[in-house]
Amino acid sequence: MAIETKNDSIDAILFDLDGTLLRVQMTEFIPQYIEGLAAYCRDWVKPRKFAKGMLKAIRELIQCDGDGMTTNEQRVFATLHQQLAVPEEALREAFSSYEQNGLESLRGLVKPIPLARKIIEECLAKNIPLVLATNPVFPEFMIRARLRWGGLADVGFQHLTSYENSCYCKPHAGYFSEVAEQLGVAPENCLMVGNDTSHDLSAAAVGMKTYLVDTWIVEREEAEWPCDNRGDHQALQCFLQQTLL
């Protein structure tokens, strides 16, 4: 059953996070995140070995399609256990300790985009359900921390994808189908907004409309998908104002 909105053509909007709603260099953020986690696992495994295992776990989430039943969280811990022979309980304790004591060291890597917040507020004013469709390779606490640092902690997203509640990752079609199913909307009535020509625009595989935000565009060696619309944040704001009348 589709969620009722005031707009007949768009039942939900999926927003990517990094480079779309906030500024962050993931090539710096991910290594520092992993380094921080490694410090809390040093009683079980050397930091360098942990970093290799964690990077492998993240790559496998993105490169390998899920089965629709195993969560990304379960896949991460299975890979870490296989690679590092560390008990899952110990890994979970390390993640929790890092959340409580080490997380704030990453704050300086995240910068707000004031116009992005205004765009979100205008969508909410039109009663359009919004999804924070960040690639779910991180635990929820890591995603909510970035929202907080990006000045978006109080935004009313109807759904947020994290590794706890997702069985797929972008650019796999299953990710987008899973989100639409969780919302109770048809994929073709959703709009995916993001800055990645592969990971975000692959929403087109399930029939979603797409908008490429090219302010801080990410282009990969992977196959690119065509976009229905494209522009910077100001152009995105105008597009949504016109589309969500």
Image (cartoon, rainbow, N blue to C red):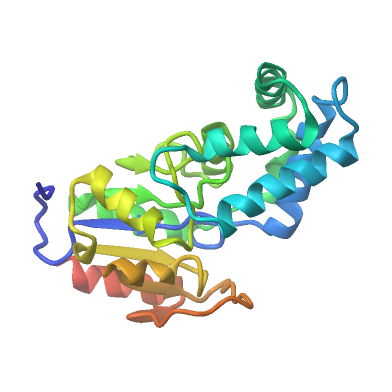
Tell me: residue 88, above or below residue 34.
above
Q: Answer yes or no: is residue 112 visible.
A: no
Residue 192 occupies quadrant: bottom left
Q: Is residue 225 left or right of residue 196?
A: left
At horizontal 18% and vertical 52% (from top left) the residue drawn is: 185
At horizontal 76% and vertical 33% (from top left) the residue drawn is: 37
Tell me: residue 41, above or below residue 158.
above
Tell me: residue 233, above or below residue 90.
below
Give the x, y percent position of residue 121.
32, 51
Q: Is residue 37 left or right of residue 196?
A: right
Give the x, y percent position of residue 52.
81, 46
Give the x, y percent position of residue 227.
38, 80
Give the x, y percent position of residue 36.
79, 35
At horizontal 56% and vertical 74% (from top left) the residue drawn is: 217
Q: Answer yes or no: is residue 167 visible.
A: yes
Nearest to the observer: residue 241 or residue 139: 139
At horizontal 54% and vertical 74% (from top left) the residue drawn is: 215
Number of on-image labels: 0
